[in-house]
Image (cartoon, rainbow, N blue to C red):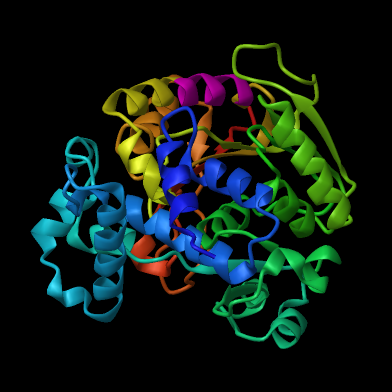
Amino acid sequence: MDTLPLIQKIIQGSDREHPADAVLRSTLKAQRALSREEGSEISRAVFAFYRWRGWLRPDDALASQLEQASALARKYALAPSAFKDDELIRYSLPSWVTEVAEITPAFARALQQEPRIWLRARPGQGREVAETLWDCSPFGKGPLADVLEYKGTKDLFRTRQFHAGHFELQDLSSIAVGLVCAPKPGETWWDACAGEGGKTLHLADLMQNRGLIWATDRAEWRLRRLRLRTARAHVFNYRSALWNAEGKLPTKTVFDGVLVDAPCSGIGTWHRNPHARWTSTRQDVSELADVQKRLLHRASSLVKPGGKLAYATCTVTREDTTGVAQEFEKSHPDFLPLVTNHPLDAHLSASPVFQFWPQDFGGNGLFVAVWRRAEA
């Protein structure tokens, strides 16, 4: 089948209100005659186009641009050193990004690579999942032995192990957030911006399905996806509710821990979602930082004395990472930075804040800070 018309249709139908990954999913879903190989070919072509868009000649026909992007992707995979550092920064990112974040050549190079696939097996099942799926490598030892990098070509969503709830697809940096939270069995936690539930599921596993998790989000469709995922994973120690920073709090419960995985500029995910590079703006960073401040302020009121508050964003800008964290500390002196062991490398220094970069461990760029509320 000639896939070029579908690739062009996806790109022509993508804009700020219609993200390319969503258009891609809906288009592939509607094309039932496509083989898995053809679907993969279309996905690679669409993502390569946006990953290399800054290098293309905009006056060329779209078919020619797609050919150029695929050629650049192949060349980079074979000889990344052929690309100069300054060119990677200049052409792979919008110019405003260098004003708000420390953009290094290593970061720019990481953004041009195809993302790695990470799995989080259920506790103690990492070895079994790796042996049954094949093409898996454990990330580390102890709890990190259940974190696997998948290097195969299977459609993981169709595997028996996935439908049995033996593993979740979850980015490595996202897994690190749950390890920083370190909830204990029997505690009560609130995942205030739960989305589709990836971190909710991880918290539940860390709590051994004991205790209670409140999972809230501002979008009902995300909570519906969360309910499907929790059912598949046999996670039942949670309640879900709609909530945003402007509405009244979802409960009067006070929590042992609260996680605010806040909406952000998302620059740390631009290797996975390259279309967002060209639809995000400098203004988005400031507006989302204001949203994060409101979320943190509201959510912190339900942390019990001695409880934890964790703040996470999948970005690397100063304004919606350290800027928000520092302002929160100034206005909430009863929340004290909580020094925590590095979740991914025991040899690295403990800290109350971590900034993960794609070039360091192969996950998303992500920031996380953690505090403990004073007892009195």
Q: What is the quadrant of residue 109 in the picture?
A: bottom left
Give above or below for 78 relative to 352.
below
Please say whether residue 201 is visible from this viewpoint: yes
Q: Is residue 294 magenta?
A: yes
Give the extent of the magenta segment. Answer: 291-299
Q: Position of residue 96 (x, y in %)?
A: 19, 35
Name the residue rendered at 88%, 45% in the picture: 237
Magenta stretch, overall SS: helix
Q: Nearer the viewer, residue 263 or 52?
A: 52
Left or right for 327, reference 147: left
Give above or below for 54 relative to 285.
below
Name the residue rendered at 24%, 42% in the picture: 101
Left or right for 73, reference 292: left
Q: Is residue 126 magenta?
A: no
Give above or below for 134 relative to 65.
below
Q: Nearer the viewer, residue 81 or 121?
A: 81
Q: Quadrant of the C terminus?
A: top right
Give above or below for 210 relative to 219.
below
Q: What is the quadrant of residue 272 in the picture?
A: bottom left
Q: Quadrant of the N terminus?
A: bottom right
Please say whether residue 357 is visible from this viewpoint: no
Q: What is the quadrant of residue 286 in the picture?
A: top left
Name the residue rendered at 67%, 12% in the picture: 247
Q: Position of residue 11 (x, y in %)?
A: 41, 43
Q: Position of residue 178 (x, y in %)?
A: 62, 53
Q: Nearer the viewer, residue 263 or 58?
A: 58
Q: Position of residue 260 (x, y in %)?
A: 58, 35
**How many marks can you see?**
0
